[in-house]
Amino acid sequence: MRESTNPEDIKLICKKFKITEIVFFTVSLLILVLKFNRIFFTGLPILSILFLGGLAILSFWLIFTGKYIYDIKNDYLQGFIGFACSALSIGILFSLQFWPGAVAVSKIGVCIALVSLVWISATVGKKIYAFDNFNNRMLLAKLVSFTLVGIWFVLTPPLEKFKQVHRKGDDPVAIRLYVETLQDPASEAKKEAYIKYIRSK
């Protein structure tokens, strides 16, 4: 009976996937650099959703297919890293868009990422995580950089995050309306006033 899955075909697909992941990671980093330097343009929120959301999906998929790309001898460690990168991507995206649940998702991602980093550190000299493998280095770079960004979003007060990465973070009216929603989160009228002003040009 003919094999339904050719290992060489899977490796070729995963190689193309890895290139796609590197592109998504690079663009996501660029988006973060633009946001933190308060450089905004039309379409940046859409790009954030597409690339950070896409990176989250790609990272999650690596939990199951990473053995064809990375030189990691422990399936559980591979799963932890994939889940951490996925959760961090979602948490950062939610934080940049100021969506509900951003801090909770970021905390989950940061916690799993820190466990993964400690685990990776413990493998030095044990040939479990190949540090001389280019793909592994890229994975580690993604994990470390997104963990640092995730920690910043978790520890930074909401108002400071608003001033730093929101396109209207230097607008006194927007700041006032945002503070009012923080002080009275149950008020639908204040939320509506804030959203209406934010959506205005």
Image (cartoon, helix red, strand yellow):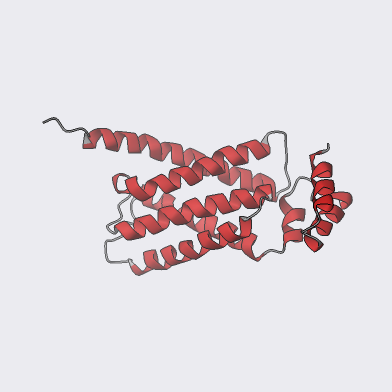
Relative to residue 114, is residue 79 depicted above or below? above
Residue at 62%, 48% (x, y): give it.
32
Residue at 33%, 66% (x, y): give it.
124
Residue at 64%, 59% (x, y): give it.
153
* In this picture, residue 31 sits left or right of residue 194: left
Instruction: Kindly tell me whether residue 179 is visible in this rendering.
Output: yes
| Quarter in which the N terminus is drawn | top left
Q: Which residue sits furthest right?
A: 173
Q: Which residue sits furthest top?
A: 2
Q: Position of residue 110 (x, y in %)?
A: 52, 62
* In this picture, residue 10 sits left or right of residue 172: left
| Quarter in which the C terminus is drawn | top right
Quadrant of the image occupied by residue 176: bottom right
Q: Nearer the viewer, residue 53 or 33?
A: 53
The mark total stands at 0
Q: Position of residue 68 (x, y in %)?
A: 29, 44
* In this picture, residue 26 sits left or right of residue 171: left
Q: Which residue sits furthest left?
A: 1
Q: Position of residue 29 (x, y in %)?
A: 57, 46
Q: Position of residue 116 (x, y in %)?
A: 42, 63
* In this picture, residue 166 sits left or right of residue 151: right
Relative to residue 3, is residue 173 depicted above or below? below
Relative to residue 20, is residue 103 depicted above or below? below
Instruction: Kindly tell me whether residue 140 is visible in this rendering.
Output: no
